[in-house]
Amino acid sequence: TSPLVVAIDGPSGSGKSSTSRGVAGRLGLAYLDTGAMYRAMTWALLQQGVALDDPGAVAAAADAVTLVSGTDPLDPTIHVGGVDVAEPIRSDEVTGSVSLVAAVPHVRELLVARQREVIAGSDGIVVEGRDIGSVVAPDAKVKIYLVADPAARAARRAAENGGADAAATEQALAARDRIDSTRAASPLVQSEGAVVVDGTHLTLDEVIDAIVRIVDAAP
Ligand code: C5P
């Protein structure tokens, strides 16, 4: 039988990572951060000096990149060719160019195949991203589309980044969402059967509670 999959999709800064890790911890499930995989691929290609605005060059270089994702919600690790990249994949440089890399269909083929292997090898897993309910795990038992007002998302992200300018952060999030939602290859969409959870006026614990209740109530 296939493992329990909880798919959590949504735009940047909606609180997907903290929420997904919390849900996995509460339910004793594994956790996969697919955004970290696109970020790690971007980091690797930047290291190699690949021109990220050249989809052909990105696709050609992507095959040789080996990613390993840990699935412990308390300690989600990510390695590229044996190097721990958990920190550098959060840099402004990677954040500013990851959407270009993620729009390349061959990159998505490679990473979606890895993601499905991780899911199939688990005993139940919370998977967060942009295309989990629509493409990676369309048969997921529970699909959540996590949203929050743009201003709330920007405030949260600016606070995480040590008090960065909220207006500039809101613009950067909007730019990334625009690319992620309008690309041809598996754009960010609210997939069929997804339950919308709006975290704008909820605490992290309240969002986690709401999703745990949805999982418990699933047939
Ligand atoms: O979730 P996070 O903000 O770390 O994701 C970084 C980027 O990776 C997103 O802006 C998007 O371009 C890409 N991504 C994606 N599909 C996923 C997860 C992330 O295209 N399933």
Image: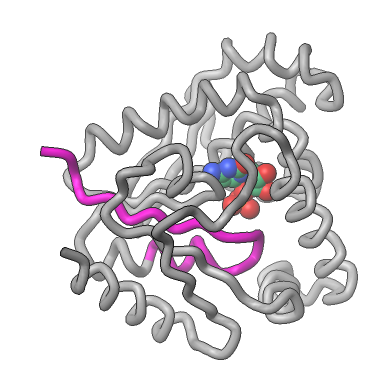
Going by the picture, which residue comes out furthest to the left? 1
Residue 71 falls within the magenta-colored stretch: no
Q: Nearer the viewer, residue 67 or 203?
A: 203
Where is residue 112 drawn, in percent x and y? 47, 30
Going by the picture, which residue comes out furthest to the bottom? 201
Q: Identify the image quadrant of the N terminus.
A: top left
Q: Identify the image quadrant of the C terminus.
A: bottom left
Q: Nearer the viewer, residue 139 or 102?
A: 139
Residue 2 falls within the magenta-colored stretch: yes
Q: Residue at x 50, y 28 (%)?
A: 111
Q: Residue at x 76, y 27 (%)?
A: 46
Where is residue 71 drawn, in percent x and y? 34, 45
Q: Residue at x 17, y 39 (%)?
A: 2
What colouring does the structure picture have? one colour
User: Can residue 112 be seen from the camera position used here?
Assistant: yes
- Quadrant for residue 182, please give it: top right
Q: Nearer the viewer, residue 196 or 61?
A: 196
Above/below status of 219 relative to 44: below
Q: Nearer the viewer, residue 193 or 199?
A: 193
Above/below status of 207 relative to 190: below
* Image mark count: 0
- Quadrant for residue 44, please give it: top right
User: Can residue 49 be seen from the camera position used here?
Assistant: no
Where is residue 100 drawn, in percent x and y? 77, 35
Q: Residue at x 47, y 80 (%)?
A: 204
Above/below status of 34 relative to 115: below
Above/below status of 199 relative to 92: below
Q: Is residue 38 left or right of residue 144?
A: right
Q: What's drawn in magenta, residue-wise? A: 1-21
Where is residue 99 drawn, in percent x and y? 73, 41
